[in-house]
Image (cartoon, rainbow, N blue to C red):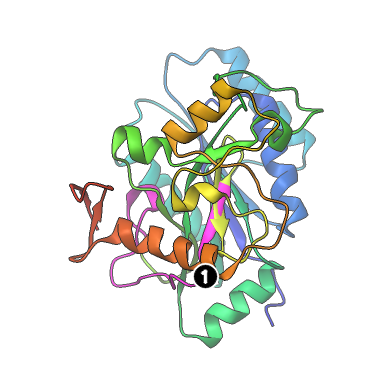
């Protein structure tokens, strides 16, 4: 059994201060004790936003390992992330952007212990985008919580932009992770134990999680209480609610199928029409 929780590694841009506070609270509830974060601010970000984020970090007891300023090049995130991973040292690293809220089927020590017993050095997840019940892009009140503000989840980014919904959520210190945390060369996560990730977005760990989004298997029936417009939006966008009952074996199988469908037959990411959109 893992005695020390994994270090959380994150490169954070000019996000909303309440979102950062909610993000820290979320991972503290998962048992994370060590946060290694780096702020990176493009030059157009006003000083007041930078000061606000540093103030939030202080309030929640986090001292940023680094703060940098400049353009956000393709390599910026990866370089800063790898610097943080080097500082974190040996063990497991939890990788999460500031708008990614991982959900796991059990305590992190148990999840990691299972990975080690089965010989997996990375754990993967499926990214689900969260929206309001009506589908509008609306703000949220911190006191109400993200789940209540954004009850629907689905593969919006994947369907609209052909983006890769797969993420590496946990990795051993000596395992290389590609830019964006979408894959790890030479390593493939166990498709039977996927993590789902949300908040504004969610990463979901394991299809047995009772909060697994039905959207992992495509469009689903909307709850009876939803308006006709909400049902239409959910169906067209492949969105699903957060089920409160235990996931069935059929849903578990469909979640694995959803992940495998993204992988494709030749290690490439495919859409529902079979079009290749990203090389794995």
- Categorize mark 1 by other alpha carbons within 10 Å: few (<14), some (14-19), many (20+): many
Task: Give the residues drawn in magenta, as a range.
Answer: 177-197
Give the residue at x 65% y 28%: 226
x, y percentage for residue 84?
A: 50, 53
In the depicted structure, whether residue 239 falls above or below residue 217:
above
In the depicted structure, whether residue 252 falls above or below residue 36:
below
In the depicted structure, whether residue 58 falls above or below residue 132:
below
x, y percentage for residue 219?
A: 46, 43
x, y percentage for residue 166?
A: 40, 54
Q: Quadrant of the N terminus?
A: bottom right
In which quarter of the view is residue 112 placed? bottom right
Mark yes or no: residue 20 visible. yes
- Residue extending farthest to the right is 143
Q: Quadrant of the C terminus?
A: bottom left
Q: Which residue is mark 1?
A: 193
Mark yes or no: residue 62 visible. no
Q: Is residue 57 left or right of residue 90?
A: right
Q: Main secondary structure of the magenta part?
A: loop
Give the residue at x 33% y 47%: 164
Q: Secondary structure at mark 1?
A: loop
Q: Which residue occupies the foreground of this view, 51 or 115?
A: 115
Task: Verify whether residue 142 appears in magenta.
Answer: no
In which quarter of the view is residue 229 placed? top right
Q: Is residue 84 left or right of residue 208?
A: left
x, y percentage for residue 117?
A: 55, 87
């Amino acid at each position: 059994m893992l005695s020390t929780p994994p270090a959380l590694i994150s490169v954070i841009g000019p996000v909303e201060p309440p979102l950062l506070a909610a993000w820290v609270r979320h991972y503290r509830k998962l048992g994370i004790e060590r946060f290694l974060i780096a702020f990176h601010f493009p030059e157009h970000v006003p000083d007041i936003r930078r000061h606000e984020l540093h103030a939030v970090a202080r309030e929640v007891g986090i001292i940023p390992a680094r703060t940098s300023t400049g353009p956000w090049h393709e390599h910026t995130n990866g370089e800063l992330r790898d610097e943080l991973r080097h500082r974190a040292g040996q063990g497991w690293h939890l990788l999460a952007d500031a708008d990614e809220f991982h959900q796991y089927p059990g305590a992190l020590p148990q999840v990691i212990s299972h990975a080690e017993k089965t010989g997996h050095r990375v754990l993967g997840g499926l990214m689900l985008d969260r929206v309001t019940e009506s589908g509008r892009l609306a703000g949220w009140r911190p006191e109400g919580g993200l789940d209540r503000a954004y009850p629907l989840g689905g593969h919006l980014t994947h369907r609209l932009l052909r983006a890769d919904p797969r993420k590496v959520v946990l990795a051993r210190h000596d395992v290389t992770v590609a830019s964006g945390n979408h894959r790890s060369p030479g390593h493939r996560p166990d498709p039977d134990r996927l993590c789902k990730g949300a908040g504004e977005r969610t990463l979901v760990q394991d299809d047995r999680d009772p909060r697994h989004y039905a959207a992992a298997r495509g469009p689903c029936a909307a709850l009876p209480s939803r308006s006709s417009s909400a049902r239409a939006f959910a169906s067209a966008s492949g969105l699903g609610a957060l089920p409160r009952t235990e996931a069935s074996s059929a849903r578990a199988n469909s979640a694995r199928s959803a992940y495998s469908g993204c992988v494709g037959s030749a290690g490439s990411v495919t859409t529902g029409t079979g079009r290749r959109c990203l090389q794995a």
